[in-house]
Amino acid sequence: MPPIYQYAGLDNTRTPGFGVEECAARIHHLAYVEERLMFLQAAHIISVPERDVKVLLARLQYEDSQHSDMLRSRLPEMRVSKKKAASVPSSPLAVLFDEAMHAANTVELLASLVLVFKPALLAAYEEYLATTNDLADYPTVRLLKLIVAEEAEGLSLLTAAYQEVAVSTEYQAAAERWALHLQKMLDAAGGVDGSQPAAETAVSPQRAGSPYVIPRELARDDAFPRVWDFVHVENEQVNTRLAQMISTRLSEVTVAEGLALVLCETPDQPWAFYADLSRHLWDEMRHSLFGEAASEDLFGDRAAMPVRDFEAHYLFKLTPLELYALIGVGVEAALMKYPPGKREEFEFCRDAARYPLMRTFQDFDWADEVLHVNIARRQLREWYDGEQSELVALAQQGLDFRASVRHEFPQEPLPDLDERLYRRAEQDVQL
């Protein structure tokens, strides 16, 4: 009996599998589907009110962008030109995802992912892995094993979310009808990998008569209390400053929502633009989770700190270019200065607050913001036709608008949390 490590441990070494042309055709379709799933999930981050679903969509849109990026990178290695790799492989698939954008609510959106798109993707990946020659097609096999692991986890999480939000029989029935309609369109298009015969007559869309427009208003459940803004305090007020920092991180959910607008409403950019914005979006949502996790750790209650709302009242009124210039050039670049800036926030958590969890969060927040500034400079250089001074002026206009909106309503003091910092006191003793 041969050792298990023969052929470097690879299976399917003596079956012909797919040829290069067939592999490339399927990968092309799958890369496009992952790309459109990125846009589908990102586009609904604003309109979904459920906090935990909103966060999950932010993570999964980023993972899907990475899946698309990996598959796109494989295509030029398979005799596919970069121009063709970036093209739409199937018009019916494009129409299908245009239709899917018009999900009426969270239940319909999750039904489309749980009942149609994600299972179809997993089935296509598994069929590919079962058929292709592992030895000949190893670079693809390796990528797909990584992708399948993430897609399987994502489907499990989405399924749990769907089961929790689909509490109304009426809403669930409507969502299942929507999913069935999308499934018929997918079948008619020849499946997510284009391997099935396409129907002679396409299934007509019901809602995609005009492009989907992301709503410009907050959608929030009652997971967290909300305030317009909170009073800034100096570092000497250690407990209150720490609470303010946690609440500021928590409120970065709105920045993630703003970046969803930039990602989804800036057409005709190179793929690298969308991959970068997808990462930036997820990072800002992660930062919001920093605040959530710290609140739960310190106070035993993730909702101990409020989310501030004023950002939505300027971010959602800007064009995508104005919005991204404000975030990347106006706000985040300024946070690189020391003091104050991101380094000072990290040092405060390490030295003054002496809170290890927030120290770690602020350390990574600082690293992320350095990355975001570099991304913004790179992408805005390609995107903006004017001079750098004009771009800086555009960012300053955004900052001025931000300041005027911020003062439309009074700032509120954060709750007095000194007596609730019981876990932090315990950690101080352990240091």
Image (cartoon, rainbow, N blue to C red):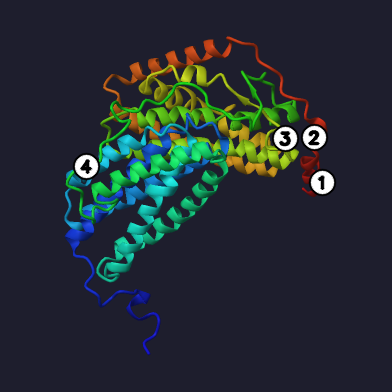
The image quadrant of residue 43 is top left
Nearest to N terminus: mark 4 or mark 2: 4
Residue 299 x, y percent position in the rendering: 75, 38
Q: Earlier in the sequence, mark 3 or mark 1?
A: 3
Residue that badge 1 annotates: 429
Q: Which mark is residue 352?
A: 3
Between the C-alphas of marks 4 and 2, the distance is: 61 Å
The image position of residue 267, as x and y in percent, is 29, 29
Badge 2 density bin: few <14, some 14–19, many ≥20, Cα 10 Å? few
Quadrant housing the N terminus: bottom left
Rendered image quadrant of residue 180: top left
Q: Which residue is mark 2?
A: 420
Give the residue type at disc 1.
Val
Q: Position of residue 278 (x, y in %)?
A: 41, 38
Do the residues under discs 4 and 2 have CB atoms within 8 angstroms? Answer: no
Q: Which residue occupies the foreground of this view, 117 or 430? A: 117
Mark positioned earlier in the residue sequence (3 or 4) = 4
- Pick whichever of labels 1 and 2 is earlier in the sequence: 2
How would you rate the neighbour count of disc 4 (Cα within 10 Å): few for under 14, some for 14-19, many for 20 or more?
some
- Label 2 with label 3: CB-CB less than 8 Å: no
> Real-space Cα distance between discs 3 and 4?
64 Å
From the image, tell me which residue sits under label 4.
Answer: 202
